[in-house]
Amino acid sequence: MKVKSLLLSMCAIAALASCSQSDDEIPGGTGSDAPEAKVILKLEGSGVQANSRAAGIPGDLTEKNGKVNDLTVFIFNQSGLVITKQYIGTPDAGANSISTTTDAKKVAVVANTGDMTTSGGAFANVASEDALKAVLSDMLVTPDTPSGDVTHKDDNLYMSGINDLSAFSDDGNGTQKATATVQLHFLSARIQLTEITFNGKTITDNKYVPSGEFDATADANFTITRVYLMNAQRVTHFLPATDGGTNYITQDLKQYTGGVAWSDPWTGTPPNQFKPNDEYTIEAAPDKFTAAANKISDIGHWYTFANDGVSDITNHPTALVVEVKWRKVKADAAASPAVPEEVQTMYFATYFGGGDQAELEAGKAYKVKLALNGNFKPTNQGGSGGGGTEDPSKPTVNSSVEVTVTPAEWSLVPEISKEWI
């Protein structure tokens, strides 16, 4: 699929409507007396098959994101009532024909949801534009199951768009035609943790080892045990409240997920309908968090729905958390008395809102670079846990931690860079 400003061009989706009173096609819709017509959806490109998990950042991620697997098309009349609703399971790269009537005024398209038009589906009872705008989608397939699947994958991201049809006019051959162009937009935001660096400032000799080697490496100063999201907003409407807007969800309807359970060190009242899900955490493993030249690259990426209007930390801005194990006190059996080892968990939290970084908006990708430039040596050598905190429930504000965030509209947002010295 060709990727342009907001990722996807479906001939920009071009919808061509032509009609004739002698047309033999059975009209769609709900009892309209208007003459029959046909809408032709044209797609360019073929897309790329792919699989997705949070860990890692594929080099062709944007290309995978642009894949269109299926379409649901809604055609509305002047009153905003649905006159045609059709699911296209395998869209053709060329023309996709849909029967409707000449009172068609507006076209909405939703991509990659699977067929939700059948009984029990989210679109089954949608009979108007307002009803479509009221439908909610959840990022979690089974919210009460932490290991449950998510609806958004690299090659299956929900998209939608809506636009007016032009007035019908004679094409010179006795056929009435109208056109519409519908630009698809991503419903989710994408967060990419592209790198974590250390030893980049005054301290240049912190010793980092992968988590599996930490306990057996007595002179290792720190390791990364996991990276995860919290307060990830998990529900959205399929269309914004205003055409062309970004207001996909109101604060009172937001629901949340995250990579760990809402328990210590996460305290206080959890955000609305918080349900942990394994998709939002990357645990240490032999092939994870491996450093080269003081850098860990392409750590992972996640999809979450918009979470704006969260300048106040109490409104639960989405957080990206790096969990570190720090050797606060090194064991010394030769000392008198002997000094036991003390290991402490530290957190480096970046918030998208709450006075920290830009809030998450639908259709934008946020690239994050973290620099852990602080001192991870034991406390008797001046160490301070690298500038981290024992409380991840608010942003880690320390001159030793540098965060660079680059948002965009898949559309890349300016890079987020955050440094802890």
Image (cartoon, grey):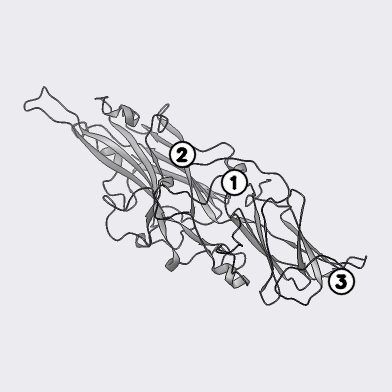
Residue 379: give x, y in percent of width and height. 20, 35
Check disc 3 and give the amino acid type. Answer: Gln
Q: Nearer the viewer, mark 3 or mark 2?
A: 3
Q: Quadrant of the C terminus?
A: top left
Position of residue 141 relative to residue 298, above or below, is below
In the displayed image of the protein, which residue is found farthest to the top? 334
Position of residue 326 relative to residue 120, above or below, is: above
Residue type highlighted by circle 2: Ala
Q: Position of residue 162 (x, y in %)?
A: 66, 64
Viewer-proximal residue among 323 and 17? 17
In the visual, does 414 lie left or right of 47?
left
Disc on the earlier residue, 2 or 1? 2
Tell me the distance, in whole angstroms, between the alpha carbons under discs 3 and 1.
41 Å
Q: Nearer the viewer, mark 3 or mark 1?
A: 3
Residue tagged by mark 2? 55
- Badge 1 is on which residue? 65
Sequence order check: which comes first, mark 3 or mark 2?
3
Task: Say which of 164 and 48 sits in front.
Answer: 48
Residue 65 in the image, given as x and y percentages of width and height: 59, 46
Judge from the rendering whether residue 14 lies leftward or rightward of residue 338; answer left or right.
Answer: right
